[in-house]
Amino acid sequence: MTKIKTGFRPLFDKMVGTNLTPITEEEVELLMFMLRSDIIFDGTGQQYLPMLEGLEQAVPLELKDEISQELVDQDTQRQEQDRQMQIRTVFLTAMKESMLQELKVRYGI
């Protein structure tokens, strides 16, 4: 529980700000645990778990004569940025859904 409490704040800061620090695999595992266990997201998080589990790692292109190392590096970087954005999107969508659920319960909306 302490790991979740201490890990949530930096993870949240990474997700919502302009912080471009890459999300580590440990943070992805922490997010998946939070979604799975309903600690933070109150029953709404489990529906987003398959989205995170389905994300693939960035796979570098095979280096061939017509493809330069620079293009391979650019493609790998683009794949990693796309993956980071998808992780942020899942997190923020789960947060939004959790907040809407809380409003429904609290105010009968």
Image: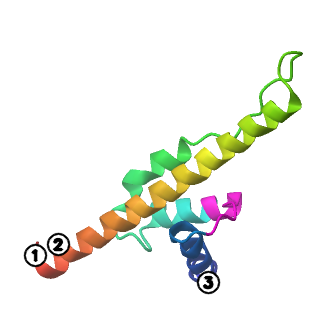
Q: Is residue 98 visible to the viewer in this orientation of the structure?
A: yes
In terms of image quadrants, where is residue 28?
bottom right
Q: Mark 1 falls on what kind of element?
A: loop
Which of 105/72 is in front?
72
Disc 2 and disc 3 in contact, CB within 8 angstroms: no
Q: Which residues are magenta?
A: 19-28
Q: Which quadrant, please, contains the N terminus?
A: bottom right
Amino acid type, residue under disc 2 in the picture: Lys
Magenta-colored stretch includes residue 68: no
Q: Is residue 43 visible to the viewer in this orientation of the structure?
A: no
Determine whether 33 is above or below 73 in the image. below
- Packing grade of label 2 (10 A; few <14, some 14-19, many >=20) is few
Determine whether 27 is above or below 12 in the image. above
Label 1 vs label 3: CA separation? Answer: 33 Å
> Which residue is identified by label 3?
2
The image shows residue 60 at horizontal and vertical percentages of 77, 33
